[in-house]
Amino acid sequence: MPREAVTRLNEGSEITIPLRNLVSMIAFTAVSVWVYFGLTERISFLEHNLELTMAEVEENDTWIDEFQPPKAVQDTVARVQELEIELAKMKLILEQNTGRWK
């Protein structure tokens, strides 16, 4: 029987389908295509945003790596370090002279 069905199908063969089912299949296809392109567009948008964000992160990382504080700040830090050393020396001298330091 399957051989007979195969031999009967040709270009002129007709298939009947209820109009309701045909409309449902067309609607399903349309919604599927719409969802597919919507998802593709969203993924492309997110990838583009990720690329922009990564470029900005790289710029910030480069800026951080190459950062030099202003000369006035560098001078102030050096003076504070010198003062800390002088203070430590004074504490040692006081401890030696008085025997203790609180």
Image: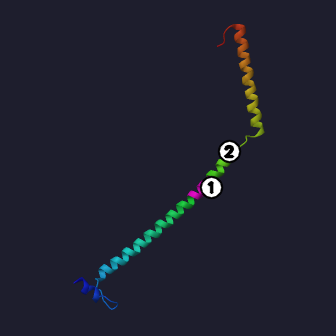
Specify the label residue 84 is tagged with: none
Q: Amino acid at mark 1?
A: Ala
In terms of image quadrants, where is residue 100? top right
Q: Which residue is mark 1?
A: 55
Q: Residues within 10 Å of mark 2 (few under 14, many from 20)?
A: few
- Please state if 17 lies on the left or on the right of 35 as rendered: left
Residue ID at (50%, 67%): 41
In terms of image quadrants, where is residue 89? top right
Measure the C-alpha gap from mark 2 to mark 1. 15 Å
Percent across and percent down for residue 97 are 72, 8
Earlier residue among tags 2 and 1: 1
Residue 55 or residue 2, whichever sits in front: 2
Check the image and report above or below for 90 versus 78: above
Magenta range: 50-56
Specify the label residue 65 is tagged with: 2
Q: Quadrant of the C terminus?
A: top right
Look at the image and name its color scheme: rainbow
